[in-house]
Image (cartoon, grey):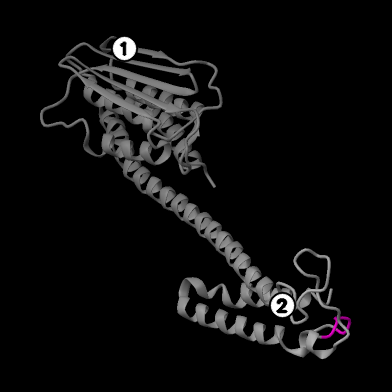
Amino acid sequence: MKALLPFLILVLIHHFLLAPLIRRKLPLYVGLTAALLVLYGVWCFSPASRPSWAPPFPEETEMMPPPPDADGRGPGNPGRRGLMSPELSRLIMGILLIGADLGVYSYIDSRRKERRMKELEAENTKQQLEALRYQINPHFLMNTLNNIHALVDIDPERAKDSIEEFSKMMRILLYEGDAPTIPLSTELDFIEHFISLMRLRYPEDALRMEILVPEERGGAVVPPLVMASFVENAFKHGVSYSEESFIRIKLELQDGKVFFHCSNSSHPSEGDGRHGIGLDNIRKRLSLLYGNTYTLSTDEQEERYDVLLAIPLQPEMRQS
């Protein structure tokens, strides 16, 4: 055990005192490590380093028999020693241990930096998602409040019903809208309340609605308000009081993906843009969550507008 103690002390000094200098002060690390190895080499060749049970140096006695010659059958050159002395062996072993410890420290440090970078990226992604979501929510709520305001003078009873539906939407936003993703069932509940709210504005025969969603949701999660934003745009740009209008919503779960298709008649008002912050914002959010594994396509024709969204059941970015 005493023979291993110098190696242990050497490695501990290097690992905890010198190796941390590599990133900040490389020249200082090189100089101190060289000085440490010089001191260690001086100690290796000093008499104090020899254990009490070790044989004396060859020059200290003439009783040591000469080593055998090359064929091993007789005495060789009396002045010839082994290929490597114990002192030189200890020095080389110490240098190798320093090199091995440097490799271990560099590997641990790189893993630590990699883990830190992932944490920073995840935090940055979370902050970007929150910023993008905060852009959508006021826009979404402002339009909803405008719809309720329009009903107050036209039909107070329906306005009361719209406020009830709005409260259900707000409950979902407040309690489940902070996460990057929410259960698909929650998003569909939000869409259902929104559709109920919007249909209060129109006569029953003014709008044809078709909604096809599976009963089994497969544990899928989706980014909040993405699908709902497409439904909002369908009402905003696709429904008219004076012309026939329709909205078709279809959702399927196939091959590990969620397929959302929204189609509506096209009745945009003059100077009304479809995109604004909406579509660009949604693409940014989808890119942050799914990388290149999502599909979002739009098809704008003279009389209809189609949106197709395909996203994995689970995003690449996991919540911490």
- The residue identified by callout 1 is 204
Residue 200 visible to an observer of this rendering: no
**Observer-nearest of 45 and 68:** 68
Residue at 32%, 36% (x, y): give it. Answer: 282
Quarter in which the N terminus is drawn = bottom right
Q: Are there few (<14), some (14-19), or many (20+) residues within 10 Å of tag 1? A: few
Q: Is residue 95 visible?
A: yes
Q: Name the one closer to the observer, 180 or 124.
A: 124
Task: Measuring from the top left, give residue 229's x and y in whole percent.
Answer: 33, 31
The image quarter containing residue 207 is top left
- Tell me the chief SS of the magenta region: loop
| Percent position of residue 148, x then y | 31, 31
Q: Do the numbered discs 1 and 2 sit on residues whose CB atoms are within 8 Å?
A: no
- Judged left or right of residue 294, residue 301 is left
Q: Residue at x 74, y 74 (%)?
A: 82
Viewer-closest of 144 and 95: 95
When asked about the image quadrant of residue 170, the answer is top left
Membership of 54 in magenta stretch: yes
When the figure is inspected, residue 172 is found, relative to residue 48, above or below; the finding is: above
Q: Indicate the amino acid at tag 1.
A: Glu
Give me the C-alpha separation between circle 1 and circle 2: 86 Å
Q: Amino acid at mark 2?
A: Ile
Q: Which contiguous range is marked in magenta?
A: 52-56
**Would you say residue 303 sits in the magenta stretch?**
no
Residue under label 2: 9
Residue 199: image x %, image y %? Answer: 33, 20
Q: Image check: 217 left or right of 6?
A: left
On screen, residue 252 above or below 103: above
Q: Quadrant of residue 56?
A: bottom right
Q: Position of residue 136 (x, y in %)?
A: 33, 40
Count residues near mark 2 (Cα–Cα under 10 Å), then give few for <14, some for 14-19, many for 20+. Answer: few
